[in-house]
Amino acid sequence: MRRRGLFDSLQMERVCLSAFWYGLLVLSGCVLIDLADGVAIGRFRRFCKFCDLRESTCTDTGSCASQCNLTSVCDTDEVCASIWRRKDDNVTIDTFCHNPAHRLHGVLLDDYNKSKCEMKELKSDQPGAQIYMCSCREDDCNDHVFFPGSISHDNPVVPDSTGDTVDTPPMRRPPVQTAPDGRVSVRRLCKFCDVRPTTCNSTDRSCHSECEITSICADFNEVCVAIWRRKDDNVTIDTFCHNPAHRLHGVLLDDYNKSKCEMKELKSDQPGAHIYMCSCREEECNDHLFFHAPPDPKDFQVVFVILVSLVPLLALAVCVIVSFYVYRVGRQRKLWDASGVARPKRKGKDFSEHAIMLDDEHSDSSSTHANSLNHNTELLPIELDAQVGKGRFAEVYKAKLKQGASTTGEPFQTVAIKIFPSEEYLSWKNEKDIFSDADLRHENVLLFLTAEERKLDKQYWLVTAYQPLGNLQEYLTRHVVSWTELRSLGGSLADGVAHLHSDRTLCGRPKVPIVHRDLKSSNILVKGDLTCCLCDFGLGLRLDNSLSVDELANSGQVGTARYMAPEVLESRINLENTESFKQTDVYSMALVLWEITSRCDAIGEVKEYEPPFGKVREHPCVESMKDSVLRDRGRPEMPSSWSNHPGIQCVCGTIEECWDHDPEARLTAQCVAERFNDMDELDKLSERSVSQEKISQDCSVSDDK
């Protein structure tokens, strides 16, 4: 048996090694193919003269030179072309690269396979105008153009320096020259574009010139240069060749021996203007510009060599370990199954591994545990204390989390346990699934710790942070709040709902929007800093893109009748638009904001707490709310005395826009949150101005004395 196990392990190792070397061979082949393609492309890219339309002394007899001193690198399929035009006494010529598969002046080139640029006359749309065009496929062949009757393929005529023609083959400046000491000099290829607007910014680490023209420098000593300028909002860049022996903008280039074009700032004669310049000597190196020093390529080479050296060893080690582990596990299972003895149970871990910080200042350190499930087989050591709440689906208890879970020296931590009976499994699962989404985590959403299935007790538990101040309804019943506390409670409530509805986290990462569908003051907890946090997601709905209209329709008429939006009461939600579900949450949030405002001392006389639509019975049914909300178009009363306070007046306006009968006319939760934030800023400014006025008054009193 042992021999067979060893044989299987060796077989697995051989398979892994074979796969690794096969993959390495395929990768090498791909690299060689790419290199071959690159060589092939480079071989057939030709050099052509490349100058815009310019005046010329050429006539339509004999031959002449284009007098263009720019040489450009053409694309693979392009050939060299020249166009000569004459209108009255105005004679021009331009040279460029062109793809013969495309029309030029309405015709397709048919003579581009020649080595000489032989002019052919074209029809001109302008009376009295003449136009000649030629094409060829040798390097720089469009520099010397031949008009009809002037070419002899055995001994072509070319003009000399005086303009007369001589029977001498055309001479072209070679791209390579040999110095007396035997060294070879090569004229460089550089980007060559005039001043043009650019999106480059000096605050960027690097950018590209966006120049499409590549030119062969005229002199063997020239290097590639780029100049970046900014004056007000006008940003430009130009690229060209330059001899570093000559001054440029009053300075001599001292960094042209580098392979990267590293920008240096120069002094500008114009106030408010900035100018940067760089130079380098690699091919087309002035295309990629660096405003900050680029990383040293040697560092990458060292890292690359280390990685290449370690990859085979790591791959081999992983293959051996995985094969050995698979063999041992499979072998152990076979032995236990064959023996008929029950497998030994896994020993419980020390609970310190599950330590969770519940204090607000340590909430970030518990991120690895929050919004996650307890996957261990053993249950957490929790001792129930007292019942603190009861709902339709579950009961909530204050409890102690024991066995050294606290770092404060206490033998336990206080948590909240929401206990669902077995028949409410679906409600527990829905809330657990919503809480388990790591993107739900927010300071205004109840901190979720874990979920457990207590099968022996036929119960399902949710373990969350405990908030000793209770829910918002209880808090408002016992307390009158100040204007500052109203801003804190209302603003944090809007922040929490906005986070639920958003499709982005605070970090900008995509998330699935969630609607609560049962927002009310008893489902909102008050934290120690008098901010709100949302809880009870048993009726929550994830607005996943995969949900169909039928699935949304089957979600039913859910929520608490007192807080239901008009469209929910009459079952007319627009299922085609998921924003409709968010609008129902906004309506419910408006009623909660009204509850908070009704208990604020800034409104004047504060009455005993009563819920929205307090005149209806304690637990109204849907039909009763239809009469109040749909038939009578009623809303909770906001007396005119509330508008005496400017802040309360703004809150009342926001509430009215949130409980509008038309769902599409309501504000979004994000807009409400921004309004509360603006109120905070305005109050800070007003407090600052009042304090400054008080100081000035005190100073004036002291001066009088």
Image (tube, rainbow, N blue to C red):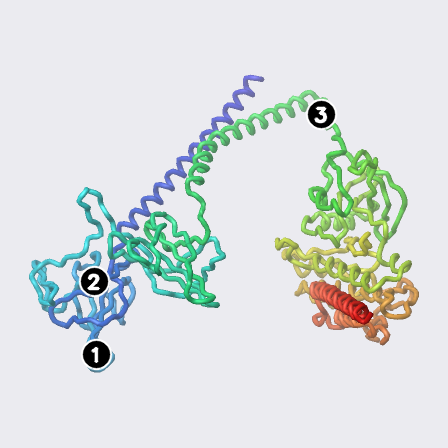
**Cα–Cα span, label 3 and label 1:** 100 Å
Q: Position of residue 430 (x, y in %)?
A: 74, 50
- Residue 675 at x, y = what percent? 72, 66
Q: Residues within 10 Å of mark 2 (few under 14, many from 20)?
A: many
> Do the CB atoms of the residues marked 3 and 2 lie less than 8 Å apart?
no
Vertical relation: 273 (above or below) 363: below
**Residue 337 in the image, given as x and y percentages of width and height:** 67, 24
Examine the rendered structure and indicate whether residue 438 appears above or below residue 580. above
Q: Which mark is residue 185?
A: none
Find numbered disc 2 in the image and state the secondary structure of the residue it sits on: helix
Q: Nearer the viewer, residue 334 or 416?
A: 416
Which one is in front in this view, the residue at disc 3 or the one at disc 1? Answer: 1
The residue identified by callout 2 is: 142
Seen in the image, is 157 located left or right of residue 604? left
Q: Quadrant of residue 30?
A: top left
Query: Which residue corresponds to mark 1?
Result: 87
In terms of image quadrants, where is residue 477? bottom right
359 in relation to 556, above or below = above
For the residues marked 1 and 2, what is the alpha-carbon distance in whole angstroms?
A: 22 Å
Q: Residues within 10 Å of mark 3 (few under 14, many from 20)?
A: few
Front residue (pair 431, 478): 478
* Quarter-of-image position of residue 382: top right
Q: Amino acid at mark 1?
A: Lys
* Res 343 label: 3
SS state under label 1? strand
